[in-house]
Amino acid sequence: MFKSIELQEVYKNFTERELFAGLDINFKVGEIHGLIGKSGSGKSTIINMVLGFDFPDKGYILFDGKIAEAQDFKMLRACTAYVPQNVNIIGSGKVWDTIQSRFDFKTNKLKRPNRKQILSVIKHLALEESILESEFKSTSGGEKQRIAIAIATLLDKQIMIFDEPSSGLDDRSKEIVATYISNLRDKIIIISTHDLVLKGICTSITNLEQK
């Protein structure tokens, strides 16, 4: 179980531009940490470093106070549910099949949800039962976003990363999603966002425009 993920004195250059110089962030269990900043400020780079897909030019990534090694990143990824900004890529066929397909992977098979569990989650996200029989690609952008969040919740991972989760949502749906995420417990939650509603539920914030 991961209790903390820390970036310590991280330096990173990108296309001959200094992105971070001595960046410190600590993501902790029970907190919702917001990464705030405009496009190009480094939000995605931080997420990629947390997941082990990118690395600092200088500095450290620590898991529970220890410098992370290759096998640690692999273990962390198995414990992470990630909701991408482009949710169009997550599925095809009916919504029911899109949800169930995530549980075909070896690490997720034992967590496969039944219909009652799925209905409980989607109703909290203001989605109707009938959407399960809809073609995923025919759903609206906001519905796709909430379906992706439902899948991430059903996977029941210890770490949840949301990349611009308000994308495609109207004001009411933003409030629903914000309330839903704020009620998640005992997890490390990272939100990359520029939305004021989601910023409001964060218990800690890194403003990358001030780094």
Image (cartoon, rainbow, N blue to C red):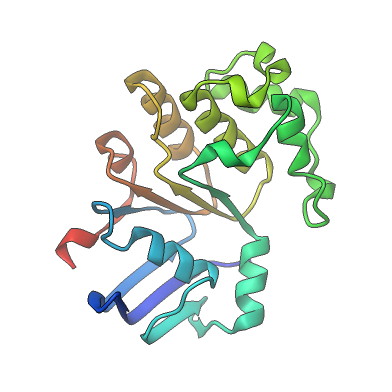
Disc tally is 0
| Nearest to the observer: residue 55 or residue 151 | 55
Q: Quadrant of the N terminus?
A: bottom right
Query: Where is residue 117 shown, x and y percent of the image?
Result: 73, 28
Tell me the residue at 67%/70% (across/down): 75
Q: For residue 111, which quarter of the picture?
A: top right
Q: For residue 100, which quarter of the picture?
A: top right
Query: Where is residue 90 shown, x and y percent of the image?
Result: 62, 41
Query: Where is residue 197 shown, x and y percent of the image?
Result: 29, 34
Tell me the residue at 59%/41% (across/down): 89
Q: In the drawing, does residue 53 fall left or right of residue 170?
A: right
Can you name the residue that lies furthest to the front here?
Answer: 15
Q: In the drawing, does residue 68 fall left or right of residue 182?
A: right
| Nearest to the observer: residue 72 or residue 93 | 93
| Nearest to the observer: residue 35 or residue 189 | 35
Compared to residue 146, the image places residue 89 above or below, namely below
| Nearest to the observer: residue 47 or residue 124 | 47
Q: Quadrant of the C terminus?
A: bottom left
Q: In the drawing, does residue 129 fall left or right of residue 40?
A: right
Compared to residue 10, the image places residue 42 above or below, namely above
Query: Where is residue 48 shown, x and y percent of the image?
Result: 47, 66
Tell me the residue at 47%/74% (across/down): 54
Tell me the residue at 36%/21% (across/down): 170
Compared to residue 156, the image places residue 209 above or below, namely below
Q: In the drawing, does residue 21 fall left or right of residue 82?
A: left
Compared to residue 21, the image places residue 85 above or below, namely above
